[in-house]
Image: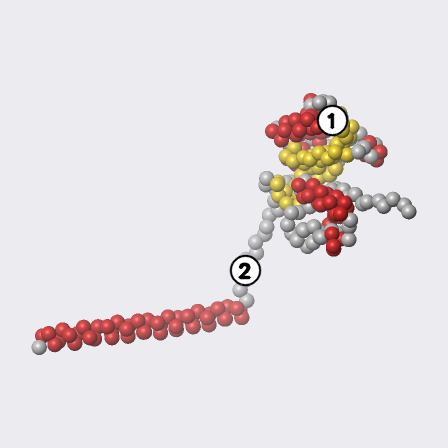
Amino acid sequence: MTNTKHTYQAMFLLENGEVREKGFSAVRDWLKGTLEKHSIDVKVLRLYGERKLAYPIGGRVRATYVLGWLEAEGEAVNAAMRDMYLVGPAFRMRFFQEAEIPEAELAFGIEEVNDADLVILDDQPEEVIEEEYVEPEEEKAASKDAADGDKKTEGKADDAKAETTETKEEPAKEAAKEEAK
Amino acid sequence: MGKKTHKKFDFKDTEDLLRYLSGQGQISSAKRTGLSAREQRSLKRAVKNARFLGLLPFVG
């Protein structure tokens, strides 16, 4: 079978913690190195942005997005994906087969980003400030009334119970008296 | 008569994709969007890819 090269657009989601720690250039070089290890021709690799995820992925709330344009064989893409999911800062990625690389994208090339300019926010979830609930006085009064009502009904229920026990006891007492006679 | 061009949706263009989603994040029907079958398929793929990459929510 002949292995033909295709053009791919790839989007990588990188862990913010590692990008902050190692710097974007180091992470980008790792990404490029891993792709090239699998004989993938990296045409463009650029920072797409650091943004909040639409939903948390594995406890992460924010991520650094890297966009790439590559030329590779299908098998090489699969192998690279497997490799990157095993080790490294990339926790999610997807490759899309495209007809050609747009010229606007080609202009980026392997983008150099000054790490000092790149602001990567903390990927910890935002703290939720829990305010203490203060019950309004009207509600307080209403709940008090309800509680009193419950007590009264409970009292009535106790009385009813007592009555039933008395009625049960009475025939037993009478039977004992007759036996004594 | 000119050849009809089909709109291709891009998973990165979340603002455009959001126009075709309901408040709960569901893809609107072709009847509602008014797109052709090919365009509706393109929209579906773009939304699903954007969801996978955390650009769009699955719900809400």
Residue A73 x, y percent position in the rendering: 72, 26
Residue B57 x, y percent position in the rendering: 66, 47
What amino acid is at disc 1? Ala
Residue A75, compared with residue B24, is above or below; it is above
**Residue located 77% across and 46% down the image:** B39
Q: Earlier in the sequence, mark 1 or mark 2?
A: 1
How many numbered markers are drawn?
2
Left or right placement of residue B60 versus residue A96 in this view = left
**Colour pattern:** secondary structure
Q: Where, quadrant-wise, is the N terminus of chain A in this rendering? A: top right
Question: Residue A72's mark?
Answer: 1
The quarter holding residue A168 reads bottom left
- The residue pinned by badge 2 equals A133
Name the residue nearer the viewer: B6 or A57: B6
Q: Identify the secondary structure beneath mark 1.
A: strand
**Residue located 8% across and 77% down the image:** A181
Residue A121 visible (yes or no): no
Chain assignment, label 1:
A
Left or right placement of residue A122 versus residue A143 in this view = right
Residue A34 x, y percent position in the rendering: 68, 25
Name the residue nearer the viewer: A175 or A21: A175
What amino acid is at disc 2? Tyr
**Residue located 69% across and 25% down the image:** A76
The quarter holding residue A27 reads top right
Residue A9 x, y percent position in the rendering: 75, 34
CA gap, disc 1 to disc 2? 59 Å
Residue A103, compared with residue B7, is above or below; it is above
Residue A134 visible (yes or no): yes
Q: Nearer the viewer, mark 1 or mark 2?
A: 1
